[in-house]
Image (spheres, rainbow, N blue to C red):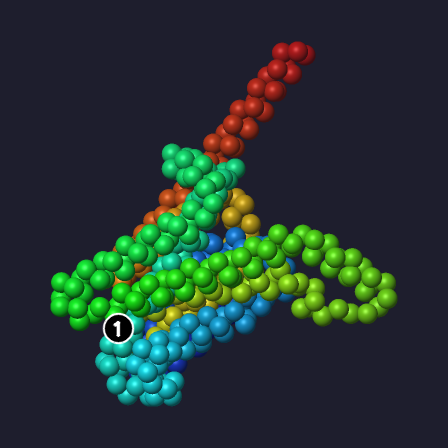
């Protein structure tokens, strides 16, 4: 099971490390290995959240997530995305940006750093909306009762998540404007950039989340129709394509997953520049890490881990909330990537341990109930 799920990840790791060695020797080998670990640690919460969505999709779309989705994640977000950032921020063509990344790495890193406020605002708003919509929903299973119960009551207020997110965005942009004024207005244009990027992140979440939610609600109806169509195809002997069997619901859930993964990858891409400004090594290291995150997502789904450890999803969403806040803070202030990664890992570890304790308590209660029932039967006999 492990080899089947992680086989491609192991193969990509071997190929990536070998390519790094031939590209830059043992130093490049070490950098790629470090970047892989960085990406996995920063994106573990991503895998948990993805698993909660992926388990609603059929086997075909799970395979698509592991194949086409990986190409989008590795080449799109880890290789093309940094180049696009430079091309847009420096008003140059994509080929010029690639040439700059390969020939003038310091200038390339400088341009990406300049674009960080827009990246952080977009990703921060998208992730913050995910966290707020989760925490304001009244759920049967609650992890931190003291905070989740009152927030679930507040969640009955319409559009509360969007209002809070916009307030956070206004505070962030106001902070940027204040800092710019104190430093003579040299970075006053950042305020507009942060506002536009943040609103774009909010709109993206609403559009993609709305579409995925709409089709998710129709998923059961779609599956029933497809099941009937499969039976009819079996009777007539005609084959239906895998895409038709997958349905529109799975497609939009897949689209939602890709946008979600893109938002999660912002911190990994930006954090990678603290280790190297070589775009080739960055793509190799982050690509390997992204592959493991996807394999881990599928593993969690197939093992039913989220059903067994019910607080894991809660911990992952709290990690999302923490990451969103960190991204908004980094618009103006620098926070080390190790702190970002540790917060997510600690929250998920805490939720996992809470799940283990809950399972033990339930097992002990069932055992005690069974023992009492046997005692009652014996006394009656």
**Where, by quadrant of the figure, is residue 103 drawn?**
bottom left
Secondary structure beneath label 1: helix
Q: Position of residue 278 (x, y in %)?
A: 30, 79
- Give above or below for 365 relative to 321: above
Nearer the observer, 234 or 195:
195
Residue at image point 18% right, 62% down? 179
The residue under label 1 is 114
- Give above or below for 212 relative to 75: above
Whether residue 281 is visible: no
Mark count: 1
Nearer the observer, 142 or 8:
142
Q: Position of residue 215 (x, y in %)?
A: 61, 57
Q: Residues within 10 Å of mark 1 (few under 14, many from 20)?
A: some
Residue at image point 19% right, 60% down? 178
Residue at image point 34% right, 85% down? 92
Nearer the observer, 229 or 162:
162
């Amino acid at each position: 099971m492990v080899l089947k799920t992680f086989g491609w990840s192991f193969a990509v790791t071997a190929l990536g490390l070998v390519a790094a060695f031939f590209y830059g020797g043992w130093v490049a080998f070490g950098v790629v290995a470090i970047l892989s670990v960085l990406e996995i640690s920063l994106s573990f919460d991503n895998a948990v959240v993805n698993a909660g969505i992926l388990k609603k999709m059929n086997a075909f779309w799970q395979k698509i997530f592991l194949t086409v989705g990986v190409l989008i994640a590795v080449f799109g977000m880890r290789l093309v995305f940094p180049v696009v950032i430079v091309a847009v921020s420096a008003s140059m063509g994509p080929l010029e940006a690639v040439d700059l990344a390969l020939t003038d790495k310091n200038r390339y890193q400088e341009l990406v750093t300049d674009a960080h406020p827009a990246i952080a605002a977009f990703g921060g708003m998208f992730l913050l909306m995910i966290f707020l919509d989760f925490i304001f929903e009244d759920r049967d299973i609650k992890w931190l009762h003291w905070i989740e119960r009152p927030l679930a009551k507040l969640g009955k207020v319409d559009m509360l998540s969007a209002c809070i997110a916009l307030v956070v965005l206004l505070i962030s942009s106001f902070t940027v404007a204040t800092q710019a004024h104190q430093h003579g207005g040299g970075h006053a244009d950042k305020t507009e950039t942060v506002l536009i990027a943040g609103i774009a992140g909010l709109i993206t979440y609403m559009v993609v989340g709305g579409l995925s939610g709409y089709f998710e609600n129709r998923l059961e109806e779609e599956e029933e129709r497809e099941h009937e169509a499969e039976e009819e195809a079996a009777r007539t002997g005609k084959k239906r394509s895998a895409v038709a069997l997958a349905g529109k619901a799975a497609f939009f859930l897949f689209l939602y997953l890709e946008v979600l993964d893109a938002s999660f990858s912002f911190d990994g891409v930006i954090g990678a520049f603290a280790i190297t400004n070589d775009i080739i090594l960055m793509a190799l290291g982050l690509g390997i890490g992204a592959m493991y995150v996807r394999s881990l997502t599928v593993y969690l789904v197939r093992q039913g881990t989220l059903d067994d450890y019910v607080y894991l999803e809660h911990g992952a969403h709290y990690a999302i909330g923490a990451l969103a806040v960190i991204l908004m803070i980094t618009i103006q202030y620098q926070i080390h990537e190790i702190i970002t990664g540790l917060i997510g890992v600690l929250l998920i570890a805490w939720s996992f341990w809470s799940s283990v304790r809950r399972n033990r308590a339930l097992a002990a209660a069932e055992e005690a109930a069974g023992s009492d029932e046997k005692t009652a039967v014996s006394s009656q006999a």
